[in-house]
Amino acid sequence: MSMLPQAHPPADLISAEIAIVGSGPGGAVTGMLLAQAGRDVVMLEEGAHVEVDAYRAFSPEEMHAKLRNNGMTMALGPSPVAFWEARCVGGGSEVNRGLYHRPSPEVIAAWAERQSIEALSPEDMTDLALEGEKVAKISTLPGPAPKVSLKLAEGAEAMGWSHMEVPRLYSYGADWQSAPQPGLKQSMSATYIPAFVAAGGRLQTGIRVTGLRRENGIWRLKARARGIWGQKTIEIRAKTVFIACGATQTPALLRRSGIKRHVGDSLAYHSMIKVVARFDEEITGDTPLDPVHQVKHFDPRFSLGASVSNPATTAFALSDRPDLLPRLASEWRHWGCYYAQSTGGMGTVRRLPGFEDPLIRAKDNPQDIEDLSAGLRALCECLFAAGAQAIYPNIQGAADLYGPQDLARLPRRLDPATVSLSTLHLTATCPMGAEDRGSVCDSFGRVWGAEDLYLADSAMLPGPTVVNPQGTIMAMARRNMNHFLH
Amino acid sequence: MSEPFDPQGFLPALSQTLLTPYGREGDGALCHQVSGFLAAQRRGLPHAMPYAMGLASVLMELSCVPLKGRRFSRLPLAARVEMVNFWRRAPLSAIRNFLKFHEVFAAYIAHSGPVELRPEMPAEKKADPA
Ligand SMILES: Cc1cc2nc3c(=O)[nH]c(=O)nc-3n(C[C@H](O)[C@H](O)[C@H](O)COP(=O)(O)OP(=O)(O)OC[C@H]3O[C@@H](n4cnc5c(N)ncnc54)[C@H](O)[C@@H]3O)c2cc1C
């Protein structure tokens, strides 16, 4: 049953004291706190509301219903980097796996220093995360983790590397084993946004904000309805605006609106490369629970993790190994998907005249490729230590590996031209900080040189989060909102 | 097994050909699903890429005439399989990447179970409103 009221077509003119653009983790936290403080808020979301459990995770139906461009988004460059970006109520929290980390103390301390951010401390961020966890609950798995996940832990144990079961934004009932879905994801559409609406906030779905300008002390937002509402132009008037469109769309909207200084100059992302490992025993399909283990031993350079491994997702993990695809149907229960993820991806976001989609470019960063290469090697070592019989790296023309002796056959340094890189974690296109630090907004998200205009999402983070980003985005949005309200 | 598949055009013909490694080329419903999904994914590509894909399709469709005497979509399945294997080893990376794009999504749909895409969802291609 829906936790949100029936969607309604937009009026031609919408007025509110505060407008929030985007309903992902950043926008949802911001909206709930503003509405609960009694402010008159409208939240504008381009996508539709789709029930969090309406579709199987990573299914074609989910891809089309919840992802921008059906999931066909990418950063171009020496090696194109594919990424997914949500377009639905709740943003990325609706499509992600809900793996949850509190903000990394080391990362927060480094941001505070590098960007001269006022009143930003690791301790405060942990407290803010704890506050947030009262609204969107986190939990560890209610039963044994899937074997595909435990294999990673087993390998790390054998190597003497630290590893963990990452908690998730999920709530599980006592009946999780017999329920159609083994738990309810604590996505924004299931937690913060119903709380926003309950506190009097207005949610308008199906409209895309295309530009904003300030006139006589009021922000005028130009927007376009489409999809189920048909094509229509809308104006929104608000005294204060929070932009929370995500790491690529926030800079695109600012640039469209003539705000360009440092905007989109400093995209940061976690680069990811996948392998498929074959084990003698069946390791997938044993439980409805998702893999949750990560090896964080090598932070901040790279981490290792286990991915959802069903035949469809494994097809993606073998995108550069089409020769293996015909074996998938009969062997998939023995195959697990794993990733190595580095933290130094860099790029830019620019408006491309004539097109709605911004131009996202991945820059060549030799250090990141080096870290990813080391991560790939460590991942293979770990999986062999866990008993893998074969490892298939997702690299064009790469050799299959049959034991630790074959690790020497891995490229010492990955060639960006032959690997399929992807990312799910993009940040820092409009970083916070002191004005002389290349920042777009101040220590609390207010855009430099623009009155009553704030950022509230992954775009404002000053760099990569090193851990899965949603917890950090939500804690930062809460921090900045506390400052705004008090 | 559902009704036989009679491919009309390049994308349906390619979809059917890409299902041969899984022995599913005779599954008409699956061929339709793959073809529809590929078309939607192509429309979703950013910037001018959908047009580039369309152009590439025309060129590949016609490139079979000098080699095999007929357009790709008019070739019998066995000849289409040969053409796909030929493109897979093409010296031009653009051709290999074009094939990889279609191959991965075909494999994804073939292994996804029955798919029901909502008709209103395909990413509409958009001009810049600003
Ligand atoms: C497949 C996947 C798996 C992931 N797994 C994890 C995980 O396990 N753990 C984790 O911590 N993180 C994960 N992430 C990353 C995490 O989901 C994102 O970092 C997070 O959602 C970003 O939040 P945000 O508020 O910045 O923006 P988003 O979540 O991107 O939300 C932005 C919203 O704004 C809307 N919007 C954009 N432009 C406009 C406009 N012009 N007008 C109106 N609305 C607009 C969009 O439709 C979208 O709903 C994953 C991401 C993906 C895609």
Image (tube, coloured by chain):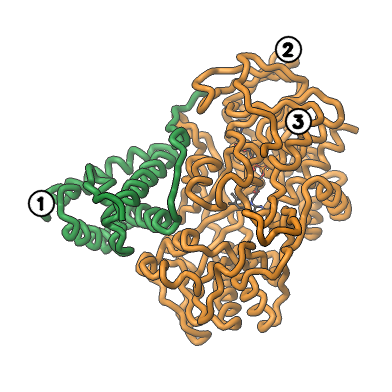
Chain colours: A orange, B green
Q: CB at mark 1 closer than 8 A to ligand 1? A: no
| Amino acid type at mark 2 | Asn
Q: Whole-percent x and y of residue A185?
A: 69, 50
Q: Whole-percent x and y of residue A451?
A: 76, 24
Q: What residue is shown with label 1?
A: B66
Vertical comparison of A35 with B77: above or below: above
Say few, some or many: other residues with alpha carbon within 10 Å of mark 2 (under 14 / 14 to 19 / 20 or more). few
Label annotation for residue A436: none
Left or right: B124 in relation to A199: left
> Could you say which is closer to the camera, residue A486 or residue A266?
A486
Tally the marks: 3
Residue depicted at x 12% and y 55%: B67
Q: Chain of mark 2?
A: A
Vertical comparison of A34 with A102: above or below: above
Q: Earlier in the sequence, mark 3 or mark 2?
A: 3
- Can residue B38 be seen at all in this image of the molecule? yes
Say few, some or many: other residues with alpha carbon within 10 Å of mark 1 (under 14 / 14 to 19 / 20 or more). few
Q: What residue is shown with label 2?
A: A216
| Amino acid type at mark 3 | Val
Label 2 residue SS: loop
Q: Quadrant of residue A241?
A: top right
On-image quarter of the N terminus of chain A: top right
Residue depicted at x 70% and y 66%: A299
Tags 3 and 2 touching, CB below 8 Å: no
- Rendering quadrant holding ligand 1: top right
Label 3 residue SS: helix
